[in-house]
Image: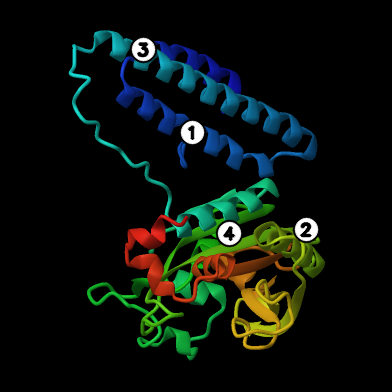
């Protein structure tokens, strides 16, 4: 997409806007989550290093221009509305209007995605109703794995081999089938598992999946990336450690802990007296996953990681019950 064409298109369209509704449609078209600026931004990682810097500056300049002309147009529309207003009784009592704000889980999700976007990752969405292949087989999860059982996954009764996704990793399969490396993707979204609801479990929760595929991608790249992320979310004072683990779709695999943000690693009730808090799982993408999506594992390597947004929000804000996020209690939500 040519940025100069977009600029001329903006100048032409803004002249014809004469209402707040039309201005909001204009804003969503260009600055919305799936708008033109987001589309341009998602193209940056696919450019060469030389092109990336120049194009990134152009996209940033375009975004700033849009924000400026939208603000100016809003002033113009407001001024016109004031001139056209009829007389009113200034003695009538006013009606206070509260400004809404984003849900704390939405805030954390956007913060996580923003951190990875600044490191060159593109944000991609995927469907919540998935195929059994994308949710399991394409990720090297064997038929006998317990996660495939009905007590661990919501299968759709009237649709063969369809289910509510149990993690955001199926989007990894979708993207790698559709696009060629190099790839750097993060995937936010809701996931579903038939867990009993209690203070730390819910049948619906939120995850962010991330993965990078290219030539000569190493485990050390994964470690460096996750350290930058963890310190951006929890502060520069935290420490990290990687513990060996097993996931069918990565090899080697590791769980990532940070030093307890409450007791600073000394040991408290929040961390079970261990001084460490688990925040995500990660590892190098298994060669079998590459084979399932048609990528040559001898030519390309990659890593993947996944985290629970709800858990990160609970740790960051000191919340001890996941159910508070879904009870719509304004006394709780107004704190964020």
User: Label 4: few (<14), some or many (≥20) within 10 Å?
Assistant: some
Residue 313's spot in the image, x, y percent?
Answer: 53, 65
Q: Is residue 32 left or right of residue 186?
A: left
Q: Earlier in the sequence, mark 1 or mark 3?
A: 1
Residue carrying label 3 = 79
Residue carrying label 1 = 31
The residue at the point 36 percent across, 12 percent down is 79
Q: CA distance from mark 1 to mark 4?
A: 27 Å
**Front label number (1 vs 2):** 1
Q: CA distance from mark 1 to mark 2?
A: 33 Å
Q: Earlier in the sequence, mark 1 or mark 2?
A: 1
Q: CA distance from mark 4 to mark 2?
A: 14 Å
Residue carrying label 4 = 176
Q: Earlier in the sequence, mark 4 or mark 2?
A: 4
Q: Nearer the viewer, residue 113 or 319?
A: 319
Q: Earlier in the sequence, mark 2 or mark 3?
A: 3
Q: Is residue 8 left or right of residue 183?
A: left
* Residue 88 higher or lower than 122, as above or below: above
- Say the numbered circle drawn on residue 226: none
The residue at the point 36 percent across, 29 percent down is 25
Contact (Cβ within 8 Å) of mark 2 with mark 3: no
Residue carrying label 2 = 215
Q: CA distance from mark 4 to mark 3?
A: 51 Å
The residue at the point 47 percent across, 30 percent down is 30
Residue 98's spot in the image, x, y percent?
Answer: 34, 42
Element on which disc 2 rests: loop
User: Label 2: few (<14), some or many (≥20) within 10 Å?
Assistant: few
**Front label number (4 vs 3):** 3
Q: Is residue 275 left or right of residue 179?
A: right
**Front label number (1 vs 4):** 1
User: Label 1: few (<14), some or many (≥20) within 10 Å?
Assistant: some
């Amino acid at each position: 997409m040519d940025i100069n064409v977009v600029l001329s298109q903006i100048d032409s369209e803004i002249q014809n806007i004469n209402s707040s509704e039309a201005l909001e449609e204009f804003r969503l078209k260009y600055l919305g989550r799936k708008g033109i600026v987001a589309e341009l931004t998602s193209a940056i990682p696919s450019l060469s290093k030389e092109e990336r810097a120049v194009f990134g500056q152009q996209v940033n300049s375009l975004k700033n221009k849009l924000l400026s002309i939208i603000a100016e147009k809003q002033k113009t529309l407001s001024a016109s509305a004031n001139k056209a207003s009829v007389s009113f009784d200034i003695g009538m009592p006013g009606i206070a209007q509260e400004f809404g704000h984003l849900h704390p889980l939405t805030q954390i999700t956007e913060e996580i995605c923003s951190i990875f976007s600044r490191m060159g990752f593109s944000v991609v969405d995927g469907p919540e109703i998935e195929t059994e292949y994308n949710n399991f087989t394409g990720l090297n999860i064997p038929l006998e794995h317990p996660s495939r059982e009905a007590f661990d996954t919501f299968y759709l009764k009237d649709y063969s081999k369809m289910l509510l996704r149990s993690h955001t990793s199926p989007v990894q399969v979708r993207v790698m089938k559709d696009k060629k490396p190099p790839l750097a993707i993060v995937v936010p979204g809701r996931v579903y598992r038939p867990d009993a609801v209690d203070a730390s479990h819910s049948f619906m929760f939120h995850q962010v999946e991330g993965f990078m595929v290219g030539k000569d991608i190493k485990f050390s790249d994964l470690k460096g990336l996750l350290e930058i992320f963890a310190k951006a979310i929890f502060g520069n004072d935290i420490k990290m450690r990687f513990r060996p683990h097993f996931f069918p779709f990565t090899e080697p695999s590791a769980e990532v802990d940070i030093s307890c943000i409450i007791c600073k690693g000394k040991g408290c009730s929040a961390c079970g007296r261990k001084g460490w808090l688990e925040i995500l799982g990660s590892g190098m993408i298994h060669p079998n996953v590459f084979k399932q999506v048609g990528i040559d594992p001898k030519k390309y390597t990659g890593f993947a990681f996944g985290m629970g947004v709800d858990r990160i929000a609970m740790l960051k804000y000191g919340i001890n019950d996941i159910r508070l996020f879904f009870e719509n209690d304004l006394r709780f939500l107004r704190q964020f």
